[in-house]
Amino acid sequence: MKSSRRTFLITSLGVASTLALSRQAFADAPKVADTDPTAQALGYKADASKVDKARYAKYAAGQDCSNCSFYQGKATDAYANCPMFAGKQVAGKGWCSAYNKKA
């Protein structure tokens, strides 16, 4: 029985520390820069008011990452993950050409 208890405790500590580290890693995920190659390809701007409206006619005032269906945070989050920029966070006030209004 002692080895079962010991195994359970070691496994529990391992799982708990893994979860804690993964949350920390998410919080420290790098922010997408406007100069990032993917950002440039998608016309991403961290500030939607600076979108080149002549180049991106699809853009309309009021569109920003926080109300896009791809934004993986709450609408009030300053930054959150976006599948368009794997492993990086986008600004809630940002915009890119992949914008798709949240239903």
Image: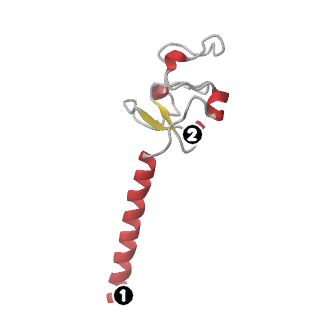
Decide if residue 39 is on the left or right side of residue 81.
Answer: right
User: How many numbered callouts?
Assistant: 2
Disc number for residue 42: none
Which residue is at the far top?
A: 54
Q: Is residue 6 above or below residue 73?
A: below
Who's the residue at 42% across and 62% down the image? 18
Badge 1 crowding class, 10 Å Cα cut-off, few under 14, some 14 to 19, many 20 or more, is few
Q: Is residue 88 above or below residue 54?
A: below
Disc number for residue 83: 2
Task: Give x and y (percent) for residue 88.
Answer: 53, 41
Task: Give x and y (percent) for residue 15.
Answer: 40, 66
Upstream in the sequence, badge 1 or badge 2?
1
Tag 2 secondary structure: helix
Decide if residue 68 is on the left or right side of residue 43.
Answer: left
Can you identify the residue that label 1 sits on?
Answer: 3
**Marks 1/2: CA–CA distance:** 43 Å
Q: Quadrant of residue 8?
A: bottom left
Q: Quadrant of residue 41?
A: top right
Q: Amino acid at mark 2?
A: Pro
Badge 2 crowding class, 10 Å Cα cut-off, few under 14, some 14 to 19, many 20 or more, is few
Most foreground residue, 63 or 27: 27
Task: Give x and y (percent) for residue 61.
Answer: 50, 13
Who's the residue at 40% across and 30% down the image? 75
Most foreground residue, 14 or 74: 14
Q: Quadrant of residue 100?
A: top right
Placement of the N terminus among the 4 image quadrants: bottom left
Who's the residue at 34% across and 76% down the image? 9
Who's the residue at 57% across and 16% down the image? 59
Tag 1 secondary structure: helix
Q: Amino acid at mark 1?
A: Ser
Residue 1 in sight in this render: no
